[in-house]
Amino acid sequence: MSSVKAVSELSGAEDLAQFGYGQELRRELGPFASFASGFSFVSILSTIFELFATGYGFGGPLFFWTWPIVFIGQFSTALCFAELAASYPVAGAVYQWSRRLSNDSIGWSAGWFMLLGYIMSVAAIAIAMQSVLPSVWIGFQVLGGDTALGSPTGAANAVILGTVAIVICSLISSLGVRAAATATAIGVYCEIIGLIILLVVLFTHTSRGPSVVLGGGVPSPTFWSFLSSTLMAAYVMYGFDSAAELSEETNDPRRTTPKAIIQCLMVSFFGGALMVMGALMAAPSLTDGNLAKDGVSYVLAAVTGGFAGQVLFAMVAISILSATLAIQNAAARVMFSMARDGALPLSSFLTRVSVRTGTPWVATLVVTVLAIALLWLSYGDPAIFSALCSVTTVTIYFAYLLVTLPMLILRIKGVNPVSGGMEYFYLGRSKGLIINFVAVVIGALLLVNVAWPRLSVFDPGNTHWYLHYFPIIFMVVASVFGLITYKYKNK
């Protein structure tokens, strides 16, 4: 009998040791918890509630078609990531995958932008509390005034509610990965039940048929306006890789994580498509401006009333909290993974793991502080929210490309990039090349589209010149600061 065990025979700790790491985090998560981490991150209820108005405002009913377009690219990326998750079951997934497919500098860049994107995502998703909590109880509008996220009072109140949500998630995380997984699972159950109830409500209160997605009698958007409307779908459909961020805390991750990545994106796609279509069919009016102002919240408030509507809004709020928790945990794992390799300043501090809970508590705390700081930088300025959502999408899509592009280059050269996990998930040589190519091309096009400087998207009120070019400015500044940090750690 060979003295070398097959991968399938290795324990989690032994498998991890093959990559040069010890088992510091606690391996306590099963298949549903892995799925829940990705599904909560995508969180169609919270993200569609947050950005439906943006998509409709630019694309009208036709913006529905941005959903399948973005899905094709993101599903191709998810399939590539599923292969990698089976081969490299290590925390800090995108960072680890990129450096192993290319080199340390490219991998570091992928991890750097992924970390920035995750931290901004924590802030961006927490903002969505403003879209639902005042509808549950007006007392949540602590500042008074207009509750709309696009208003100054709504924007300011969103920062307060978002801060409270992030702090609550930090407290849950401090209890350990099992407590966080339980809270995330509760959020997923609420999201699924809430989604089913919402779909039943929408499709039983329709004002028009499904042909509304072909235009609904509303003037068609220009080509450029339609491209702008893809921001919603692009913002919603990322984060499926977060299941891989918890690989070191998942039992049998080579088998479990690839399935979780694919399942969470598939469920999100079909559920989200029905939700967008249902909202368009049930909206009392397509032309009175309310869909472009309040989105799904407007439709739900119009077709339900009293206690039933409040219950649905409350379930959405729980989904948002669950999403915030999932993203925060993913960000902490990326920071921990990079620091463990000595790739970040204060690495020895950032790698500290709680003896009691087995979680990277310092990294979690740092993510919390940075996310809250981002919120307060945008206090009272609604224009910054669209810019924040856009930059979040840009940074993460760029990090994804730093994985899929090196992976494609290896395939073109005839090198198998995932030889270590073929028994668990493998697309095949020819099919893998085609899917990988689609992931790179659509991913690059989406990146350029979302980052393109548009006054109507980033600063509709023309209040700050820098917001017009905010994604480009941010990427340049982040790249320069990242280069300085990288050089400092490698001198």
Image (cartoon, helix red, strand yellow):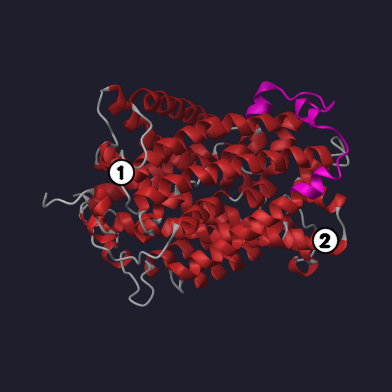
| Residue type at tag 1 | Ser
Q: Nearer the viewer, residue 79 or 252?
A: 252
The answer for how far apart the CA atoms under marks 1 and 2 are is: 46 Å
What residue type is disc 2 on?
Answer: Ala
**For this rendering, which residue is in front, 332 or 468?**
332
The picture places residue 334, in percent across and down from the top left corner, at 38, 54
Does dot 1 land on a helix, a strand or a loop? Answer: helix
Of mark 1 and mark 2, the one earlier in the sequence is 1
In the rendered structure, the answer to whether residue 111 lies left or right of residue 296 reads left
- Residue visible at 43% across and 56% down? 331
- The picture places residue 175, in percent across and down from the top left corner, at 46, 74
User: Which of 228 and 469 lies nearest the eye of the viewer?
Assistant: 228
Vertical arrangement, residue 68 with respect to residue 92, above or below: above
The residue pinned by badge 2 equals 308
The span picked out in magenta is: 199-227
Q: Is residue 14 rendered magenta in the image?
A: no
Circle 1 residue: 87
